[in-house]
Image: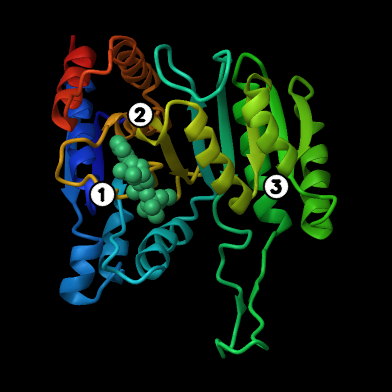
Amino acid sequence: MSTSINLAVIPGDGIGQEVVAQGLKVLAAVLPQDVKLETREYDLGAQRWHRTGETLPDAELEALKAHDAILLGAIGDPSVPSGVLERGLLLKLRFAFDHFVNLRPSKLFPNTDTPLAGRPEIDFVVVREGTEGPYTGNGGSLRTGTPAEVATEVSVNTAYGVERVVRDAYERAAARPRKKLTLVHKNNVLVYAGHMWKNIFDTVGREYPQVTTDYLHVDAATIFFVTQPERFDVIVTDNLFGDILTDLAAAVTGGIGLAASGNINPTGAFPSMFEPVHGSAPDIAGTGKADPTATVLSVALMLRHLGREELAVRIEDAVAADLAERDGTFRSTDRIGDALAARVAG
Ligand code: ATP
Ligand code: MG
């Protein structure tokens, strides 16, 4: 295993800056002395766009390729027209680095709030396809603004793209104690894509006889996320359904301040990118109210991806212990970061 980590850091906008600082603090504290951490910060996001009009210049895209992984805070600001940074930066990175696995674990930690009655056991992982579906920018409209306007947004699903993410999900399910994989789609209405997903899911599944499988329509899945979340272990789904389901999952497991994610290229051909699910939260930026825990948990996902499982577990245990001791007293972003850093170090 490599004894150094060469990390690209994109703090981004709003609370992105604040939470990334805490993520790096905990990372520095958890790494053994013989692992050298090198970081390079990239100035990308709303401020850069205002200054130069650039979102992600090719030279920086090229430079990013040389890193072992990318840690991202959050990108976006109300002063930038909607879509500019999402398409020009976030989606551009995802597509250029072929982040076809968007990984979002959902776990209800002890002593955290859930709106669900009876505090069910929740510990599942959503594997969301990251490069296809309706997010590829296929479609169009003449933008006439007239009552006759027609807009299309084409969902692209390739057998190649579906197979590789489904296979990744089976691998993840096979490695977990419960070994259960649920496909979520809508194949009663979206019949072309839906049947391809289901066929590939069934075919690949023959190679994983130890994994129990299940299929749910996405509308039914939203019900079960709320009424029976304990039935889920690993979920695989397309880009759009995964986007929506994972926000719901975050909401039932203690909120957006705890939800971590990884945009992963499992082949290792390009660096994977780890980020909290939440956005730049301009409403609380600069107030110290941002919870850095989602970013710290994203650092754990990153370490796991880099083959350092024991460090990932140490961070996750520290988060669980920190959450267990929370009593509602306000702690600033910094203080939470300090507490987590102290726990992983000690
Ligand atoms: P984006 O479009 O970038 O995803 P969004 O509009 O979905 O952004 P967020 O920036 O995620 O919104 O913020 C949604 C709400 O959650 C806001 O009220 C924000 O203050 C709150 N929030 C987001 N992240 C955190 C955090 N880490 N700690 C505490 N509150 C947060
Ligand atoms: Mg959002």
Q: CA distance from mark 3 to mark 1?
A: 40 Å
Where is residue 44 drawn, in percent x and y? Answer: 23, 60
Nearer the observer, 103 or 6: 103
Q: CA distance from mark 2 to mark 1?
A: 23 Å
Q: Residues within 10 Å of mark 2 (few under 14, many from 20)?
A: many
- Answer yes or no: is residue 162 visible: yes
Q: Nearer the viewer, residue 237 or 287?
A: 287
SS class of the residue under badge 2? helix
Circle 1: residue type: Asp
The kind of residue on which mark 3 rests is Glu
Residue at horizontal 58 percent and vertical 38 percent from the top? 127
- Say above or below: 244 vs 149: above
Question: Label 1: which residue?
Answer: 283
- On the image, the x and y values in percent for residue 314 come to 32, 15
Location of mark 3 (residue): 163
Q: Which is nearer the eye, 115 or 194? A: 115
Give the image location of residue 167, x and y in percent. 67, 38
Closer to the chain start, of discs 2 and 1, is 1
Q: Amino acid at mark 2?
A: Leu
Label 1, ligand 1: CB separation under 8 Å: yes
Q: Which quarter of the figure has residue 277?
A: top left
Q: Nearer the viewer, mark 3 or mark 2?
A: 2
Marker disc for residue 297? 2
